[in-house]
């Protein structure tokens, strides 16, 4: 394993006293080191969590170099990056195309010299090309660029056209170099897209600036993009120097309720942070990703609209109801009872946990007997009822034959928006703060 200069807890504490000795809150830790800082993502996992878990299991001999780490809810790829840092193979699933892009871009190391050369090609003359677009726009001349298929009214002009010019340059780069390099630069374009759009800062749902603020919003595209490209290139060069090319990262654009691409008994450890409720009423990953994925990667609007419906508990119901899960978890049964008494959203809770249970079944199928799984879960509220997701996770997994080895509490130190649950589900309205998580560590049943 390569040394992580950002560690805040001594590894000796980890090996001598086990997982309980670690302060899993990691207050003041740098969570943006290496490629973790390439792109923002809602409810991103603190990278120190997979880092410490992998270090521990490698030291204990539960894992060895070349083993496979699987994350069924990959998001921006935190687990995959840490897997590669620890000389392990990574396998990841997500139903969000932007998550697939980010996981690949962040975790697959690139040749530092090639990245540098591609950066030069990409930025060469770009500033004056974007200035020309502005002049043409102001002169009312036609500009020969295909506009991205975003919704009307979400971008200023000529900035949207300028973003399209950058996208075309990255497409050229893909032809000249390869897909991996182009993907890496799409991440900087995705970041720029969010900054340039009328999306309100700090909101993960689609929430537009007021009309007055839109009139004042006149961002300069080139410096935003150039700065992000340079930052990302520097992070990637450091990551690539530290990371072995011997391992593989497999990222599937796939639903983890089926996990069709992951083979039986093929995984040595699972480290994952599931969504804490259906996307629509908690964190709308699809809404967050819509414009960035359309502009930077040419994804379709209709495809991006499906993301939040396909998330756990979403309206795309692919599984039959499974009432029995209520009997398999006392915590779930008590929660549903309280929600029913309050006339709350017990059906929604049931659908979410039914889907989550399907992922647990798949984890059991793919994980080798006796190997660990770590679920990093936050307890949300629904209809102002606290949902003890950590206990429900434990009990449903126990029903499948998993054994609990550690229940590791942590606080969420930077109280950013995704953890502020808005039960009324209105933009800008915040409800109870979700400041606690648990890492539920279990082992798969022996054969
Ligand atoms: C809490 S986020 C994961 C964040 C990630 N650990 C990181 O550090 O960026 C949960 C992820 O689960 C994904 N997801 C939700 N339902 C899914 C499903 N049925 N199959 C696969 N991924 C799903 C969401 O798109 C989202 O990216």
Image (spheres, helix red, strand yellow):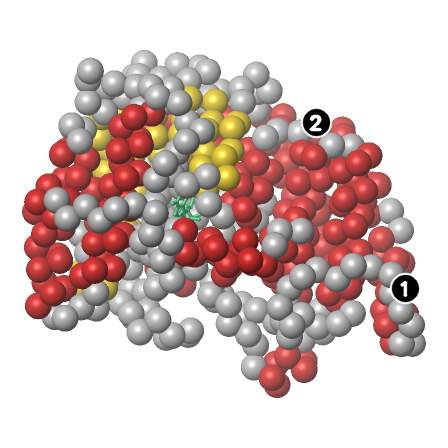
In the image, residue 250 lies at what x, y percent? 51, 28
Distance of label 2 from label 1 (alpha carbons): 33 Å
Q: Residue at x 42, y 73 (%)?
A: 427
Q: Which residue is label 1 attached to?
A: 132
Horizontal arrangement in the rendering, residue 107 relative to residue 216 (left or right): left
Q: Residue at x 57, y 77 (%)?
A: 209
Other residues around mark 1 within 10 Å, as few (<14) / some (14–19) / many (≥20): some
Q: Disc 1 on helix, strand or loop?
A: helix
Task: In the rendered view, tell whether residue 196 sits above or below residue 50.
Answer: below
Q: Position of residue 243 (x, y in %)?
A: 57, 24
Q: Give the residue displayed 29% in from the left and 70% down from the top.
A: 423
Q: Is ligand 1 closer than 8 angstroms to the Cβ of mark 1?
A: no
Whether residue 132 sits left or right of residue 251 in the image: it is: right
Residue 16 in picture, x, y percent from top left: 25, 22
Query: 223 above or below 322?
Result: below
Q: Give the quarter of the image for residue 200.
A: bottom right
In-image side of 300 versus 347 (left or right): right
Rendering quarter of residue 370: top left
Q: Which mark is residue 111?
A: 2
Quadrant into which the C terminus falls: top left
């Amino acid at each position: 394993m390569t040394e992580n200069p950002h560690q805040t807890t001594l590894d000796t504490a980890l090996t001598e006293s086990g997982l309980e000795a670690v302060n899993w809150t990691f207050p003041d830790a740098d969570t943006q080191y290496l490629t973790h800082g390439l792109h923002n993502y809602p409810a991103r996992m603190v990278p120190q969590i997979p880092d410490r878990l992998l270090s521990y299991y490698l030291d204990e001999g539960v894992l060895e170099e070349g083993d496979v780490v699987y994350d069924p809810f990959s998001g921006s790829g935190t687990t995959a990056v840490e897997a590669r840092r620890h000389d392990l193979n990574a396998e990841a699933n997500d139903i969000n195309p932007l998550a697939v892009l980010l996981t690949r871009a962040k975790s697959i190391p690139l040749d530092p010299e090639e990245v540098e050369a591609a950066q030069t090609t990409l930025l060469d003359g770009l500033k004056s090309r974007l200035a020309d677009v502005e002049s043409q726009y102001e002169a009312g001349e036609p500009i020969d660029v295909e506009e991205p298929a975003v919704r009307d009214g979400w971008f200023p002009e000529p900035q949207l056209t300028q973003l399209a010019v950058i996208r075309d340059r990255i497409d050229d780069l893909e032809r000249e170099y390869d897909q991996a390099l182009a993907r890496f630069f799409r991440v900087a374009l995705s970041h720029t897209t969010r900054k340039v759009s009328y999306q309100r800062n700090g909101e993960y749902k689609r929430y537009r600036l007021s009309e007055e603020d839109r009139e004042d919003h006149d961002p300069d595209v080139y410096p935003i993009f150039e700065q992000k490209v340079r930052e990302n290139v520097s992070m990637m060069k450091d990551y690539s120097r530290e990371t072995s090319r011997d391992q593989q990262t497999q990222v599937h654009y796939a639903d983890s309720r089926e996990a069709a691409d992951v083979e039986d008994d093929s995984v040595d450890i699972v480290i994952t942070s599931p969504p804490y409720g259906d996307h629509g009423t908690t964190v709308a990953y699809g809404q967050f990703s819509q414009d960035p994925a359309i502009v930077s990667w040419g994804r379709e609007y209709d495809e991006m609209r499906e993301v939040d419906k396909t998330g756990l508990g979403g309206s795309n119901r692919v599984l039959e109801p499974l009432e029995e899960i209520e009997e398999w978890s006392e915590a779930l049964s008590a929660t549903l009872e309280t929600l029913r008494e309050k006339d709350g959203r017990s059906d929604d809770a049931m659908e979410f946990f039914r889907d989550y249970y399907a992922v647990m079944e798949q984890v059991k199928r793919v994980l080798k007997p006796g190997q660990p799984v770590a679920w990093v879960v936050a307890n949300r509220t629904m209809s102002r009822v606290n949902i003890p997701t950590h206990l429900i996770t434990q009990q449903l997994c126990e029903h499948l034959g998993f054994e609990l080895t550690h229940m590791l509490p942590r606080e969420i130190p930077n109280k950013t928006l995704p953890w502020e649950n808005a039960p009324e589900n209105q933009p800008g309205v915040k409800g109870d703060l979700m400041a606690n998580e648990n890492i539920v560590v279990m082992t798969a049943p022996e054969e």
